[in-house]
Amino acid sequence: MIIYTGGNNRSVKMDQLTLDSWGTSPKPAVMRVSEVTAVITSLLDTPELTNIRVTGEITNFKRHGSGHLYFSLSERQGEKEFVIRCTIWKTAAKYLPWKPEDGMIVEAFGSINHYERSGQYNLIVTQMWQSGAGEKALLIERWKRELGLKGYFSPERKRPLPDYPTKIGVVTSETGAVIHDIQNVLSCRFPVEIILSPTAVQGPTAHDEIAAAIRRVAPMVDLVIVGRGGGSYEDLFAFNNPAVVEAIATCPVPVIAAIGHEVDVTLADLAADVRASTPSHAAELAVKDRKSELEMISQIRGRIFRRLLTRVEQADEELNDLRDRLSPVRMNRTLADRRQYLVDITDRMNNLSDLSLGRFRVQVRELNARLEARNPSGILMREIPERRIRIADLNEQLCRGADTFLARYRAEIESLSKILEARSPYAAARDGYCIVFKDGKTVSSARVLSEGEMVDLRFRDGSASAVIDQVKPHEEV
C-alpha cells in the first residue's frame, strides 16, 4: 500500500495494482482529482528531479515583501521558449551574495516540487550562481553602444515640444488602455485631433511594426506619442530594438516615449525627445491646459488696460501742472508782489537822507533791472513756446507708444483667438462638415452607432435629425 498526500491535506490511498495498471487498462477506473495530482507528485518525486542543477535566463523576477524570490528560468530554441517557474525562500535568499535581475544567465541548484492544490510544479532553489549577464542584456548593451555612436541618445539632438499642436499621433495597441488614457487627458486639458497608428507592442515582430507605425503617422501630425502600459522585461524588449530607436531618432516631429514605468528604461526612452512615466503623463506634457491659457489671456488684457490707464493719467497730470504754472492768475499774483516790493523800496528811499539817496538809487536801478529780467511777460514769451513744444513731444510719444503697445498685444490676442477658434469643434462646420450627436453626446467613431438609431446633425447654420441606415467602419490610420 502506497500513501500520497492530497491537496486538501488528507491522505489518499491507492493500491499498487492501480499504479501498475495506469495507462494500460482499456477502461481505467474513474479517479478523483486528488488522486491524479497524487500520481503526478509521485512521478515527479524521483532522484532525477532532486538536487539538480538547471541553467537558464532569469525572467519575470519579483522580490516579495516577505523576502521570498519568485522568477522563471527560460531557454529559447528557435521559435520555441521553455520556462520553469522557480522559488527561493527567504531563508536561502538572504545568503545570495548578489542581486538577481531579469536577463541574467544563472545556474540554480534545487529540487522539483509539485503543488497539488494548484496543479503546478516549481523548482525550489536552495543555491544559485551567476553565469553571465544574460543574452538579452548583453544584446541591449551592444545596441546601446552602437546607437550611441550614431548620436541617437545625445542631449543636443533633443527637440522641444510644440506649444500648441493641432494633431497628435499615437503609436500603440488599438485594443489596450493606452489610447483611452491619452484621449481622456487630452479632452480635459486641450482637445486636439488624435491619429492612432496601431501596432503590436510585444512579440517577435513587434519592433518592425512599431517602427513602421511611427514612420506612417509622422507626416500627418505635429507630435508623436509612443506608448505602452508598462510590462515585464520580456514584454518591453521590442522597444530596445535598433529599428524602433532609429525610427524615433529620425522622426521629423518630436516624440514622447511613454513605454514603461519609472524603473523601466528602454533604448526607445533614451532616444525620444521627452520621456513620460505613463501614457497619461505623456498627454499632459503634449498639450497645455486650456483653462490656464484662457486665464493667461485674461491677465494679459488686464495688464494692457492698467498700463495704458496709468500712462494716460501720468500725461494728464503733466498737462495740468503745465497749465497751473502758466495760468494768468498766478502770473498776475507774482507781478503784484514785485510791484508792492518796488513801492516799499520807493517809500524807504523818500524817507532817507540825501546822503543815502544816491546809494539807494543805485540799488533801485539794480532792482529795476532784476525785476525787468523777471518780468512775467518776458518769462511768458520765452517759456510758452518751449512748453508748447514739450507738450507736443509728450503727446506724440504718448500716441506713438500707445499705438505700438496696442498693436503688439492686439496681434498676440488675435493669434491666440485664432488658435482657440481653429480648435473649436464647430470650426469644421464652416467647411461643410457637421457634428454628430447621439443622446446629447458627440459621436467620434462609427463603431458606437447601430442601424436604426436616431442621431442629431449640427451644421454651421442649424441642425437636423437622421436615422442610421447602415454602419461601415473603416480602418484607423
Image (tube, grey):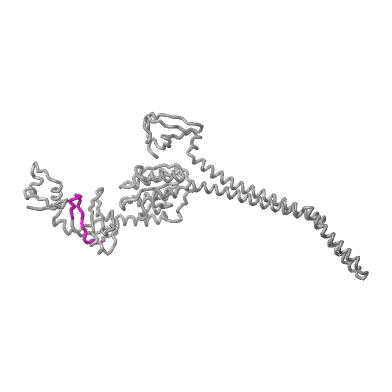
Q: Residue at x 43, y 42 (%)?
A: 194
Residue 118 painted magenta:
yes
Q: Between 429 and 34, which is closer to the camera in this rendering?
A: 34
Total of numbered circles in the picture? 0
| Above or below, comparing residue 113 to residue 179 in the picture | below
Can you give x and y, in whole percent of width and height, for residue 124 in the image? Answer: 20, 57
Image quarter where the C terminus lies is: top left
For residue 379, which quarter of the picture? bottom right
Can you give x and y, in whole percent of width and height, for residue 469 in the image? Answer: 38, 28
Q: Main secondary structure of the magenta part?
A: strand
Q: Which residues are magenta?
A: 113-129
Residue 214 in view of the camera: no
Residue 396 painted magenta:
no
Can you give x and y, in whole percent of width and height, for residue 55 in the image? Answer: 23, 57
Q: Between 362 and 234, which is closer to the camera in this rendering?
A: 362
Q: Between 98 and 320, which is closer to the camera in this rendering?
A: 320
Q: Between 294 and 61, which is closer to the camera in this rendering?
A: 294
Can you give x and y, in whole percent of width and height, for residue 162 in the image? Answer: 48, 48
Q: Residue furthest bottom?
A: 355
Residue 116 in view of the camera: yes
